[in-house]
Amino acid sequence: MPDLKPLEVGVMFWAGRDPLETVREQKSLGVSCGQLGVPGHVPMDGQAIADWRNALESEYFTLVTCFAAYNGEDYADIPTVQRTVGFIPPATRAEREARTIELSDFAAAIGVPSIACHIGFVPEDKNEKIHYGIISQLGTFNPFRVAFHEWAGIFRDVSNAKSLREAMGFVFGPPGWSPDGSRKTSASIKAAWRARQQAQTVAAE
């Protein structure tokens, strides 16, 4: 996919129809980049991957993000949003966790570097306990630390690196990379999640 120009304008559009026709429709608006929303019912199988790759490559169109929409989301009013939207609602979290992982694999397969979703309703009561399903709790609501804690962690790792190779690995390696392989990576987290799902399926049977 082509590189973006500085401050290039794009569009958000939705999967669900023929990928080639969909991309050409966006290009008719005079844009060549955008964000693809994927509704919860839309398949992301091998055929969909091949069709989207072909459409993006043949039309020279750049996707910057794949956005996960989930089955059952409803934006009718604030109480409905609180109950149905995003990653947080406990009743649908397992299903939406699986869908998000599937979307992540789909995005990687078609060459899209990032994914996004609605996290969900943030309670008005700051004392209400909500588990957000992230890998580890940050322990702070400080926006500066939330935004830059990963950068600070990379800086610490690079400062403590024992060689140039280790330093380069911390900067350019995949998330969770470590010289001895002791940290959790995206692949190991996915593998552990799939193992838990299989164990739960067996237990249910």
Image (cartoon, rainbow, N blue to C red):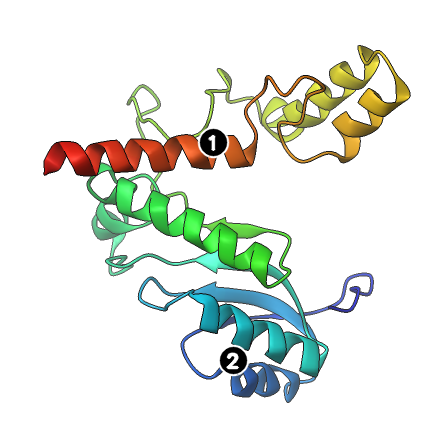
Can you give x and y, in whole percent of width and height, for residue 89 in the image? 26, 40
Q: Are marks 1 and 2 in contact (CB under 8 Å)?
A: no
Can you give x and y, in whole percent of width and height, for residue 176 in the image? 62, 27
Residue occupying image coordinates x 53% and y 36%: 187
In which quadrant will I find the N terminus? bottom right
Q: Which residue is mark 1?
A: 189
Type of the residue with mark 1: Ile
Tell me if I can see residue 143 in this picture.
Answer: yes
Give the tally of numbered discs.
2
Dot 2 falls on a residue whose secondary structure is helix
Marks 1/2: CA–CA distance = 31 Å
Residue occupying image coordinates x 47% and y 84%: 18
Can you give x and y, in whole percent of width and height, for residue 72 in the image? 23, 58
Type of the residue with mark 2: Pro
Q: Which residue is mark 2?
A: 19
Report whether 201 appears left or right of 159. Answer: left
Instruction: Report crowding for label 2: few under 14, some 14 to 19, many 20 or more residues within 10 A (C-alpha).
Output: many
